[in-house]
Image (tube, grey):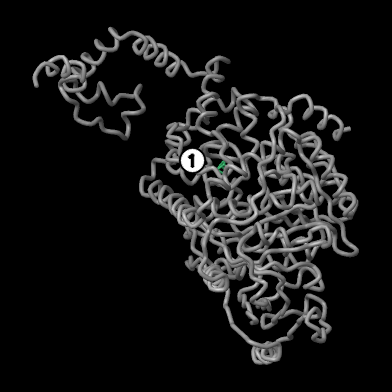
Amino acid sequence: MSRESILKSIIANKPAKIGLPKPIEISNNEYRDLTEKFIDMAKSAGSEIVEIDSMEKVMEWIIRQKSDGKVVFDLTQESVPTQQFLSIHDFSNSDIVVLRGQMGVAENGAVWIDEHDMLIRKLPFITSHLVLVLKKNKILKDMHQVYNQIDLKNTGFGVFIAGPSKTADIEQSLVIGAHGPIRHTILLLS
Amino acid sequence: MKHSQAAKVFLKNAPRTQWHDKALWFAREKRDIQKNQVTEWETLRDHASQIKEHALSNLDDYLMEFEQNAIGNGIVVHWASDAEEHNRIVFNILQKAGVRKLVKSKSMLTEECRMNPYLENKGIEVIESDLGERIIQLDKQEPSHIVMPAIHMKKEEIGKLFEKELHTETGNNDPQYLTAAARSHLRKHFLSAEVALTGVNFAIAETGGFVVCTNEGNADMGVHHARIHIASMGIEKLIPKKEHLAVFIRLLARSATGQPITNYTSHFQKPEKGKEIHIILVDNGRSEHLGEEKFWRALKCIRCGACMNTCPVYRRSGGHSYGYTIPGPIGSILTPKIDLKQFADLPFASSLCGSCSDVCPVKIDIHEQLYQWRQEVYEHGHLSWIKKTGFRVVGKILASPRLYGLTGTIARFFLIYAPGFLVYNRMNTWGKSRDIPTLPRQSFQEWYKENRNKS
Ligand code: SF4
């Protein structure tokens, strides 16, 4: 079987054992203010940032955006009722999906969400406007810190999202909205 | 075709060569800006290098740990010794599912395995979903770069191609417009995808999961719509622990495209309810490569493409001139291991300036390996006679101080007084697009003899 022959070949050929370096706990970069750095980085990745001070205002903001499309949101963790939604083929261009963001990363403006936040996995990708609600105190400095908090063994799927989907495959011109969302908003909740 | 001949064809169009050179240098500059914002950049590179070396030197253990955890997560694990076996596994999964179409995101491994032609021969429709890869596929070309597959194409050419294939407006070459056309064209395929394939950027032994990085979101669009997700990975993609992801994710996008992180960094741990994930662990020569004392470190590569963007030879000869899926400096040290004779000229497609090793996020000693491969090529008798004779003569001269001094005097005489055709002739390819600087009449030695007693 290939499994055995591959493993045998590795054992026969592998170099002498080399040790692991000591883990990096946190980066040396000094940021004046984590929220400020996060906002800067998120904006440069194409995210819109709206600072909001209460959950009620989040709801108001969503309703204001909704126009004629369907709004799908799942903020179950924040004890807001979950709306049922239709099959994926019914999503039109005016759809907004609102999800809870678990953690923000100051060094790159990305937000971590996992399966528990998105009902079905295609949701954050199929919508044309993704809105993530993130608490300011959930912004961490860097990837080392964030990975220490992420529990991969307890989720089926998780993703860092940094801005709307984009491509630069044609002459390196940046185009927003390759396959996924065209708009990406982070509602920063204090 | 040899690299130098293919490069010659590429260089015929001078303005285009310049444009290509600049486009790649732009990517290098973006990388520098990002790199300069991370104070511990060099520490990260050291860590990344050491983690990879550690993982490769314990690869059998980590593969078994990964396998066990992946199976525990409900992932089906396959092993493939070579390209053929990999392709067969993919085909069997499709056949078992009764599906005739495969939607895939970018994977250099499937290019290496020549999977698309294999499947197409068996009647499977393969849809590349990364924009660059789709352009290349529609135009029946090969990617010329591992991160930016269509970097060698002008927007006018892509406009023409889309006009023919996607019925876009005549003469509209606006990247925004063309991307939108590709978006709606590919969306149909995403929504109807039943089986989707992705590559793997990192697989984690400790968690039995893997990570895929894209900017477009095409990998996620494919797999989350499909019933079956196939992930193809080379066995060298394994890292031991979750915490190591932090090191690699911080380095990858900054090195590749000058972004602090890719748009989507997706972590697949378990299949979604009612769905399947298959992972194919591919060897295809890697385990044997591990036994090459001077060359095994090339397996640390995370395929960021930074060494291509910085390479003065790659920028001025284009990816296709290397004649292999992975071009540029890293390609030139991977290919000789695959077929020393066929790729004998690639280790010479370098100025040995060392820029590739300087930018490599996992600190592969690329230029030193290039130099070592040159010795191998010579020892195995694959050197062209011009190079061989040239090297032999130069070797003799450099070994003898007397000959060296004499040659210098004669050379200076000739270069100053000889007509151009003697210097810029067919035998001397260096003379083709280069001018020799004005030479002093005296060598340093002669000058020193004359001046040492003066002051
Ligand atoms: S060799 Fe280094 S620089 Fe080149 S693609 Fe691989 S990781 Fe990137």
Q: Which sits in the foreground, B348 or A45? A: A45
**Residue visible at 78% across and 73% down in the picture:** A117
Is A74 located above or below residue B386 in the figure? below
Q: Which sits in the foreground, B54 or A157? A: B54
- The image quarter containing residue A152 is bottom right
Is B236 located above or below residue A46 in the figure? above
Few, some or many C-alpha atoms within 10 Å of disc 1 (few <14, some 14-19, many ≥20)? Answer: some
Is B236 located above or below residue A121 in the figure? above
**Mark 1 = which residue?**
B358
**Residue visible at 82% across and 28% down in the picture:** A8
Is residue A105 visible in the rendered structure shown here? yes
Q: Which sits in the foreground, A148 or B193? A: A148
- The image quarter containing residue B334 is top right
Chain holding disc 1: B
Residue B309 percent across, percent down from the top left:
48, 46
Residue B144 percent across, percent down from the top left:
55, 46
